[in-house]
């Protein structure tokens, strides 16, 4: 699958988003009041709203609901508190023009990241941040949370795809420890190739090598 990534990392295909980066902005803001938590099925509408605003094609709430029901998936959401304006989950026509969804804790869901747990490795399914919340380092936080989830699940590594033309995303991935491992010709809908990137867990990968 190919992932459209904004302010983070990911990939997009004809179904649920899985694996590479398309568009990313990474200007950090350490003071941003962002909290990360595991996604729950009730977040599906908010995730779909963010997907509509950042990806083409996008996922709908039904697709996200099916993903969140799976045991081999790990989704995390970014929640911002004190953002101002009325928060209404799943409403693409909010009066303040913002994109996101209500969080049970009183904040706003403004981004998400998804990870598939495969046979020993993880694959980034999607990473997106609401347009009005980009350029605050939220994507980086989500990506690091996915890598932590991969380690917790004893995954030796994580893969994703990224456009060769997306220098900002490639820089983000390199800074988080990803390395180029191959190329997928004509991977994106417009015909551009995708670079295959790998991240190797420093502890799990070393343990697997010792056992081998």
Image (cartoon, rainbow, N blue to C red):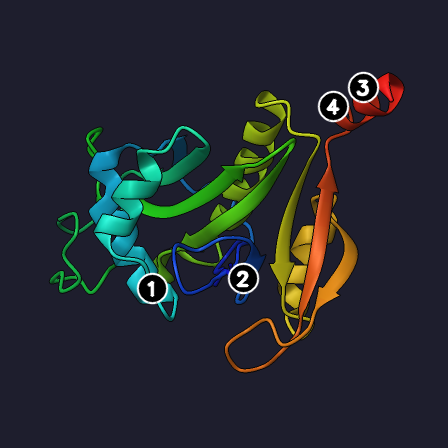
Label 2: how many Cα within 10 Å (few below 14, some 14–19, many 20+) = many
- How far apart are the alpha carbons under marks 3 and 2? 34 Å
- Among numbered discs 4 and 2, the one appearing first in the sequence: 2
- How far apart are the alpha carbons under marks 1 and 2? 19 Å
Q: Position of residue 88 (x, y in %)?
A: 13, 48
Q: Position of residue 187 (x, y in %)?
A: 59, 71
Q: Residue at x 58, y 81 (%)?
A: 191
- How far apart are the alpha carbons under marks 3 and 4? 5 Å
- Among numbered discs 1 and 2, the one appearing first in the sequence: 2
Q: Position of residue 45 (x, y in %)?
A: 20, 48
- How far apart are the alpha carbons under marks 1 and 4? 34 Å
- Among numbered discs 1 and 4, the one appearing first in the sequence: 1
Asked whether the beta carbons under mark 4 and mark 2 sit within 8 Å of each other, the answer is no
Asked whether the beta carbons under mark 1 and mark 4 sit within 8 Å of each other, the answer is no
Residue that numbered label 3 is attached to:
207
Callout 1 secondary element: loop
Residue that numbered label 1 is attached to:
58
Label 1: how many Cα within 10 Å (few below 14, some 14–19, many 20+) = many
Q: Quadrant of the C terminus?
A: top right
When asked about the image quadrant of residue 165, the answer is bottom right
Residue that numbered label 2 is attached to:
25
Asked whether the beta carbons under mark 1 and mark 2 sit within 8 Å of each other, the answer is no
Label 3: how many Cα within 10 Å (few below 14, some 14–19, many 20+) = few
Q: Is residue 120 above or below residue 43?
A: above
Residue that numbered label 4 is attached to:
204
- How far apart are the alpha carbons under marks 3 and 1? 38 Å
Give the total number of marks visible in the rendering.
4
Callout 2 secondary element: loop
Q: Residue at x 77, y 22 (%)?
A: 203
Res. 150 mark:
none
């Amino acid at each position: 699958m190919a992932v459209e990534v904004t302010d983070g990392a990911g990939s997009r295909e004809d179904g649920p988003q899985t694996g590479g980066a398309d568009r990313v902005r990474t200007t950090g803001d350490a003071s941003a009041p962002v909290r990360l938590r595991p996604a729950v099925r009730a977040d599906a509408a908010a995730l779909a709203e963010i997907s509509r605003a950042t990806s083409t094609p996008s996922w709908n709430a039904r697709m996200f609901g099916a993903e969140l029901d799976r045991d081999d998936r790990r989704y995390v959401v970014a929640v911002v508190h004190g953002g101002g304006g009325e928060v209404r989950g799943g409403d693409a026509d909010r009066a303040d023009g913002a994109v996101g969804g209500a969080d049970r804790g009183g904040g706003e869901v403004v981004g998400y990241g998804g990870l598939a747990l495969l046979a020993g490795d993880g694959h980034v399914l999607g990473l997106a941040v609401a347009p009005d919340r980009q350029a605050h380092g939220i994507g980086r936080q989500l990506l690091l949370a996915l890598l932590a989830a991969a380690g917790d699940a004893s995954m030796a590594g994580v893969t994703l795809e990224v456009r060769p033309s997306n220098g900002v995303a490639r820089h983000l991935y390199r800074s988080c420890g990803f390395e180029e491992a191959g190329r997928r010709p004509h991977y994106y809908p417009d015909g551009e190739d995708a670079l295959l990137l790998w991240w190797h867990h420093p502890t799990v990968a070393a343990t697997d090598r010792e056992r081998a």
